[in-house]
Image: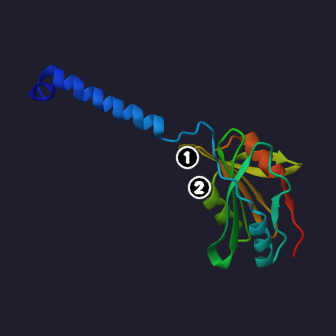
Amino acid sequence: MRRFTQGFYGYAVALFVCLAAAALFLLVTPQSREEHIPRLDYSITVANFGHAVPYQVWAPAKDPAGWVPNSNKIAKGQNGAQALYLGYATAKRQHAMFVQSDEKPPAGFASRMANSDKAVGTEQVNGQPWERRFREDKNQRTLVRTLPDVTLVVTGTADWPELAELAASLQQRPKG
């Protein structure tokens, strides 16, 4: 027994046993090669938000092709305002999020969502101007549209065309 536990031969046997155990572990462990992003339906959240706020809410008429809605919530903003958040994994598997709120002042809300208060230009989406903001250290791009009763923000690590695609899908929902 001693010759199995000492010297080079003992080392080689111990190494073989460890490698065999690792290989056996890899064989019996379930593995998936398919991407799995959980899909969350946001229709109830949008409806509940519509009942809670005094204005018509905005939401995507239809999710962009290949996008997966993966988060949604209603949260308290500042000064008693509420905000609706809809998060997505884009077709290029980047992150995009749509947020809306009637928080005052609108510029403060937009700056907080964009992590920046500096505009870097504008973009026309469905004939409407959206302000562009960019925060390089976070690789965060943001489109902001301020309306009289609500501020719309589309933000994330997605590129400008993908963010514009989400902004273009937004439509006002009937109140009630």
Residue 146, relative to residue 32: is it above or below?
A: below
User: Which is more toward the observer, 107 or 28?
Assistant: 28
Quarter of the picture containing the C terminus is: bottom right
- Near mark 1 (Cα within 10 A), the count class, few <14, some 14-19 or many ≥20, is few
Callout 2, which amino acid?
Answer: Asn
Residue at 17 percent of width and 25 percent of height: 10
Q: Which residue is mark 2?
A: 115
Colour scheme in use: rainbow
Residues at discs 1 and 2 in contact (Cβ within 8 Å): yes
- Relative image position of residue 2 (x, y in whole percent): 9, 28
Residue at the spot of label 1: 138
- Going by the image, does 52 lie left or right of 35? right
Quadrant of the image for the N terminus? Answer: top left
Earlier sequence position, callout 1 versus callout 2: 2
> Residue 139's image quarter?
top right
Give residue 17's position: percent from left, percent from top: 29, 30
Query: As displayed, is residue 148 above or below residue 158?
Result: below
The number of callouts visible is: 2
Q: What is the residue that sits farthest to the front in this orientation? A: 1
Nearer to us in this view, 32 or 5: 5
Q: CA distance from mark 1 to mark 2?
A: 9 Å
Identify the image quadrant of residue 162: top right
Residue at 80% over, 45% down: 165
Q: Secondary structure at mark 1?
A: helix
- What amino acid is at disc 1? Lys
